[in-house]
Image (spheres, rainbow, N blue to C red):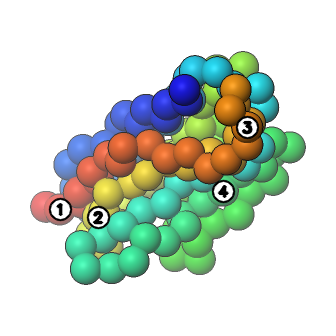
């Protein structure tokens, strides 16, 4: 069984920074794309950033230049460094991994971590 566990959310003032982490554990053979999504109240879940196994990155337009996604393949962990946070970044952030485990290939999700940007 594979688990994704997120950490690093919290309350921060506008202009502040947070770093989210997501560690995958369990029977893992290979991890392909890893990403971060977010869902604000009353809105659909949206892709914030994705990183491939080769290190290619893509970002939501509204976070370009402020957020950076990275991964440590040795630790099966993906990070999201969020700088210059704005109130509109407030949401539950979910990590996601396309991976091959003991039971085959599939998409796995973390439980979500709350990020609140407010003064």
CA separation, marks 3 and 1?
Answer: 42 Å
Q: Quadrant of the N terminus?
A: top right
The picture places residue 6, in percent across and down from the top left corner, at 41, 36
Which callout, 2 or 3, points to the residue nearer the camera?
3
Residue 82, relative to residue 89: is it above or below? above
21 sits left or right of 40 in the view: right
Which callout, 4 or 1, points to the residue nearer the camera?
4
CA separation, marks 2 and 1?
Answer: 8 Å
Q: Secondary structure at mark 1?
A: loop
CA separation, marks 2 and 3?
Answer: 34 Å
Residue at mark 4: 50
The picture places residue 13, in percent across and down from the top left corner, at 22, 55
Circles 3 and 4, Cβ within 8 Å, touching? The answer is: no
Circles 3 and 1, Cβ within 8 Å, touching? The answer is: no
* Residue 73 seen from this side: no
Residue at mark 3: 104
Residue at x-position 33% and y-position 79%: 43
Q: Secondary structure at mark 4?
A: strand
Residue at mark 2: 90
CA separation, marks 4 and 2?
Answer: 19 Å
Q: Secondary structure at mark 2?
A: loop
| Crowd around label 1: few <14 · some 14–19 · many ≥20 (10 Å) | some
- Indicate which disc, 3 or 4, sits on the residue closer to the N terminus: 4
Circles 2 and 1, Cβ within 8 Å, touching? The answer is: yes
Circles 2 and 3, Cβ within 8 Å, touching? The answer is: no
Residue at mark 1: 118
Q: Secondary structure at mark 3?
A: strand
Residue 25 lies in what quarter of the image? top right
| Crowd around label 2: few <14 · some 14–19 · many ≥20 (10 Å) | many
């Amino acid at each position: 069984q594979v688990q994704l566990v997120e950490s690093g959310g919290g309350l921060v003032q506008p202009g502040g920074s947070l770093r989210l982490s997501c560690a995958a554990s369990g029977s893992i053979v290979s991890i392909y794309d890893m990403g971060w999504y977010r869902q604000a109240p009353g809105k659909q879940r949206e892709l914030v950033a994705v990183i491939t196994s080769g290190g290619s990155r893509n970002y939501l337009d509204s976070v370009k230049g402020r957020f950076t996604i990275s991964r440590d393949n040795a630790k099966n962990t993906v990070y999201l460094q969020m700088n210059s946070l704005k109130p509109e970044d407030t949401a539950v952030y979910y990590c996601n991994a396309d991976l091959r485990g003991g039971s085959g290939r599939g998409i796995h999700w973390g439980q979500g971590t709350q990020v609140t940007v407010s003064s």
